[in-house]
Image (spheres, helix red, strand yellow):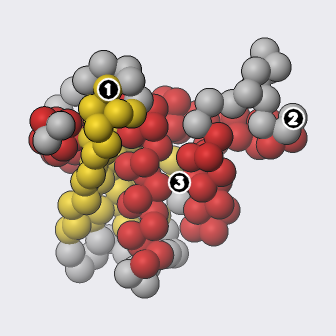
């Protein structure tokens, strides 16, 4: 395996409410587990944060940037970065319904990281027995419980 595989998850209790995010990074040399939380956030913000923090970790640690594969159980994140964000930018960060894009500041950061690292984006069904998605889910729960 000459690539970095990333699994991410995020969530919160209530929406907004206390939340957590998590990422598992699988590299040829080592596995990394990252997590964090916020006392007042939304599910989507935590899903976005998980991916952002994983990609920032790769950059900050000089890791292999050649082939990065992201697995998220958030269609909001996966479709947002692969299908919607370029349209939002063209339209001045408004949706098709002419409303401001929610979580714009997160999307701007993620778009910059996506442009720099060019990861592939994959959706995985949550709570379906995927080992690393389940690990991320448990880490998210642990972070939420801190609040």
Where is residue 34, by image quadrant? bottom left
Instruction: Please state if 131 lies on the left or on the right of 112 as rendered.
Output: left
Q: Looking at the picture, how far across and down is residue 147, in whole percent?
A: 18, 37
Question: Of marks 2 and 1, which one's residue comes earlier in the chain?
Answer: 1
The residue tagged 1 is 17
- Left or right, residue 27 beside residue 103: left
**Image location (x, y in percent) of residue 95:** 76, 25
Q: CA distance from mark 3 to mark 2?
A: 25 Å
The answer to whether residue 15 is visible is yes
Residue 3 visible in the snapshot: no
Upstream in sequence: badge 1 or badge 3:
1
Q: What kind of element bears circle 3? A: strand
Give the CA distance from mark 1 to mark 3. 30 Å
Q: Is residue 117 above or below residue 61?
A: above
Residue 74 percent across, percent down from the top left: 43, 32
Q: Nearer the viewer, residue 97 or 147?
A: 147
Q: What residue did someone put label 2 on?
A: 91
Residue situated in front as seen by the camera: 133 or 28: 133
Question: Do residues under tags 3 and 2 come within 8 Å of each other at their CB atoms?
Answer: no
Q: Are marks 1 and 3 in contact (CB under 8 Å)?
A: no
Nearer the viewer's eye, disc 2 or disc 1?
1
Residue designated by label 3: 120
Which of the 4 image quarters holds residue 113? bottom right
Instruction: Bin the neighbour count of mark 3 within 10 Å (Cα to Cα): few under 14, some 14-19, many 20 and up.
Output: some
Residue furthest bottom as drawn: 62
Q: Nearer the viewer, mark 1 or mark 3?
A: 1
């Amino acid at each position: 395996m000459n690539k970095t595989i990333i699994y991410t998850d995020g969530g919160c209790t209530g929406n907004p409410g206390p939340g957590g995010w998590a990422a598992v990074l699988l590299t040829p040399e080592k596995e990394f587990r990252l997590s964090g939380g916020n006392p007042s956030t939304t599910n989507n913000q935590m899903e976005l944060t998980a991916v952002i923090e994983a990609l920032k970790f790769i950059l900050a640690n000089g890791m292999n940037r050649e082939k990065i594969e992201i697995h998220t159980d958030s269609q909001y994140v996966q479709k947002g970065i692969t299908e919607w964000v370029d349209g939002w930018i063209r339209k001045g960060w408004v949706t098709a319904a002419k409303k401001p894009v929610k979580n714009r500041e997160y999307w701007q950061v993620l778009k910059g990281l996506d442009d720099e690292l060019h990861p592939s984006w994959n959706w995985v069904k949550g709570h379906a027995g995927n080992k690393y998605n389940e690990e991320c889910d448990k880490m998210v729960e642990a972070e939420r419980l801190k609040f």
